[in-house]
Amino acid sequence: MNGTATLWWDVQTESICYIDQTCLPADYTIVECHTIERLVRAINRLEIRGAPALGVAGAYGIALAARASKSKQFKAFLSDVFRDAETLRETRPTAVNLGWGIDRVLEKTARAPDIASARKIALEEARLIADEDTASCHAIGMLGASLLPETCTILTHCNAGSLACSSWGTALGVIRSAVQEGKKVKVIACETRPLLQGSRLTAWELVRDGIDVTVITDSSAASLMRKNIIDAVVVGADRVTGDVVFNKIGTYMHAVCARYHNIPFYVAAPVSTFDTKKTESDVIIEERDREEVTTMGNRVFVPDAARVKNYAFDATPMKLISALITERGVLIPPINIESIISLKNTK
Ligand code: MRU
C-alpha cells in the first residue's frame, strides 16, 4: 500500500511533474509542466486537484516562476514572481491551501539576498511543504484510524486520497492507516457528480491498494445509511473556518443524513486547510462551467434553454461534525473558532 506521490519537482527537466487526474482511471499519464501558463491550465482543468495538492502545486509554481523570470535585477525578478503568483492564485477560490502554499514560498523568496538564492530557497520551501503534507497525512491517518471500529464500512465523498495530497491522503489516509493496522475496512465511494472524483479517482486508488471499494451514485447514500450499511462517514476539507467546513458539493447532504441516522461524520484535514480569519459568508464558492453538468462525452443531457447551477463546493456547519481529525490532534464537539485556533497553535 503506497498512496502514490501526486506531483513532484523533476530536477533534470526543472519542471513540475504530475499525474494527470483527468485521464484516470483509463490512462496513467505523467505530465511535465514547464510554465505558469501550463500550470494554470492544469489547475483549471483539475489535472491537479484536491486542497493539499493545490497547496503543493502553488508552492512549486512559485519555484517555477522564479526559474522562468529573465530579469537581472532582484526587484524586477520579484515583481515577475509576484505577478505569476497572482495569476496562479486566481485559478480556484475555495480551497485555502493554494494561496497558503503560494504565500509561504513567496515570503521566503522575497527575503532572499539575490536571484540565485531566491530560486534555491523557493524550491527548498516547496519541497518542505510537500514533505510536511505527507507527514501530516500519516499523522491524520493514525489518529483517525483509532476512531474506526475493527470491522466497518466507511462512506466517503469525492477524493481525499493520495491524488488530492502530496501522498497517502486525508480521508483515505485514515482508511489506509486503519487497513495497515489490520482493521477490516470496506469503503463506499460516492461517485461525486459532475466530475466523478469518487468513481474515477477514489475507486482507482483503493483498487490499486487492494482495499474493498464499492461505487454508488451520490443519491444512494441516504438509503444505505437507512439500511444500517454505513458505520461512519469520512471526508476531507477544502477550507475549515470557525463555523463551517467547505468540501466537495454533496458533503453537506451526507452530514445531514448521517446526523439523522446517528452515524459519526468525520472530517480529516491538515491545519494548512484552516482559515481562522474568515467565516462562511466571506468565502467564495467556486461555480464551474455548465458543460460539466449538461454533457457526458459527446451527448448533451440538458436542454439549451434550461439554466444550470454548478457549485463545486458546499459548507457543512460544525454542529454536524463528530470529529475534526488533524495532524495535531482530534477536535470533538463543541468545535468552534476558539478550539480551532488553539489546535492550530499546538506544536
Ligand atoms: O474540485 P476538487 O476535486 O479539487 O475538490 C476536492 C475536494 O473537495 C476534496 O474533498 C478536498 O479537497 C479534500 S482533499 C484531501
Image (cartoon, rainbow, N blue to C red):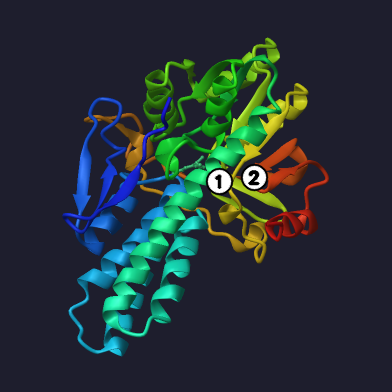
Residue 55 appears in the rendering: no
For mark 2, what is the residue? 326
Which percent across, then down, holds residue 245?
64, 47
Residue 158 in picture, x, y percent from top left: 48, 34
Give the labeled residue for mark 1. Answer: 136
Instruction: Say which of 179 and 255 sits in front.
Output: 179
Disc 1 residue crowd, few under 14, some 14–19, many 20+, Cα 10 Å = many
Q: Residue at x 60, y 40 (%)?
A: 139
Q: Which residue is at 68% across, 57% downward?
A: 347
> Marks 1 and 2, Cα distance to the nearest angstrom?
8 Å
> Residue 185 falls in which quadrant of the image?
top right
Horizontal and vertical percent for residue 134?
A: 48, 44
Residue 301 in picture, x, y percent from top left: 33, 29
Residue at x 65%, y 33% (from the top left corner): 144
**Residue 15 shows which numbered tag?**
none
In the image, residue 22 above or below residue 281: above
Query: At label 1, which amino acid type do we have?
Result: Ser
Identify which residue is drawn at 29% across, 30% down.
24
- Label pair 1/2, CB-CB below 8 angstroms: yes
